[in-house]
Image (spheres, grey):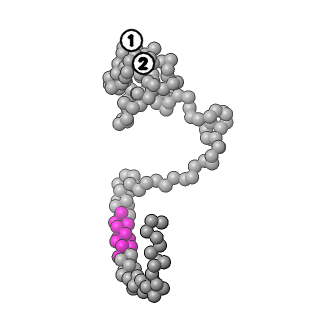
Amino acid sequence: MAGGNVLSKLSLQEIQSELARRRRGLPALHAKRRSAEGKVARAQHTLDGINELIAMLGGASAAPAKRGVGRPRGSKSPVYAASGRRGGPSTSRRAALGGMSLVEALRKALAGKQMRVTDAVSAVRTVGYNSASPNLRVMVNQALINKKNKSLFRKISRGVYTAA
């Protein structure tokens, strides 16, 4: 060490007196802890009352839901275990519900046109794709550059795409 061991320079008497000095401060630390615990208990009581009122009015509690540990690693999802497939469904949840997927909306919006990603976001909404995501621009960009969609979209120049 650069500074050396400080304790090795102190006598046993000095070390013992320092320990005694610190022990004398223990009652004050215990009092501080009891005070803080009381404040926490009062705050928790207030939160419990607020959560009760929210529940009575039919709202959801702001307390985060506790999650379980989940499936063991390597086990298959019970939904897909019987079919032997890995992963989730082949179509998006939106497509399964009768709407269109983002890729389908992009194909419609870019058909015969060249657009920048920001313009494609507006066009996708115009075509009927609804999303409340604050990251829709990122999602559109990822759909355009995804290797799975390489046959569907073609990059014209930097940031400009068209339907293939």
Q: Which residues are magenta?
A: 34-47
Q: Is residue 68 left or right of residue 139?
A: right
Q: Quadrant of residue 111?
A: top left
- Distance CA(mark 1)–CA(mark 2): 13 Å
Q: Which kind of residue does numbered mark 1 sit on?
A: Gly
Circle number at residue 132: none
Residue at horizontal 64 percent and vertical 32 percent from the top: 85
Mark 1, Cα crowd under 10 Å, few <14 / some 14-19 / many 20+, is few
- Mark whose residue sits in front, 1 or 2: 2
Q: Does the stretch in magenta take in 154?
A: no
The answer to whether residue 12 is above or below residue 85 is below
Report if the CB atoms under discs 1 and 2 are less than 8 Å apart.
no
In the image, 69 versus 99, the foreground residue is 69
Residue 146: x %, y % from top left:
48, 26
Residue drawn at (41%, 27%), measured in percent from left and top?
Answer: 141
Residue 15 x, y percent position in the rendering? 45, 83
Q: Secondary structure at mark 2?
A: strand
- Tell me the residue at 38%/54% (across/down): 62
Mark 1 secondary-structure assignment? loop
Majority secondary structure in the magenta region = helix
Quarter of the picture containing the C terminus is top left
Q: Label 1: which residue?
A: 112
Which residue extends farthest top?
Answer: 112
Q: Residues within 10 Å of mark 2 (few under 14, many from 20)?
A: some
Residue 20 seen in the figure = no
**Mark identifier at residue 155:** 2
If you read the primary sequence from the N terminus, does the residue marked by circle 1 or circle 2 appear first? 1
45 w.r.t. 135: above or below: below
**Residue 23, quarter of picture:** bottom left
* Nearest to the observer: residue 161 or residue 126: 161
Q: Nearer the viewer, residue 123 or 97?
A: 123
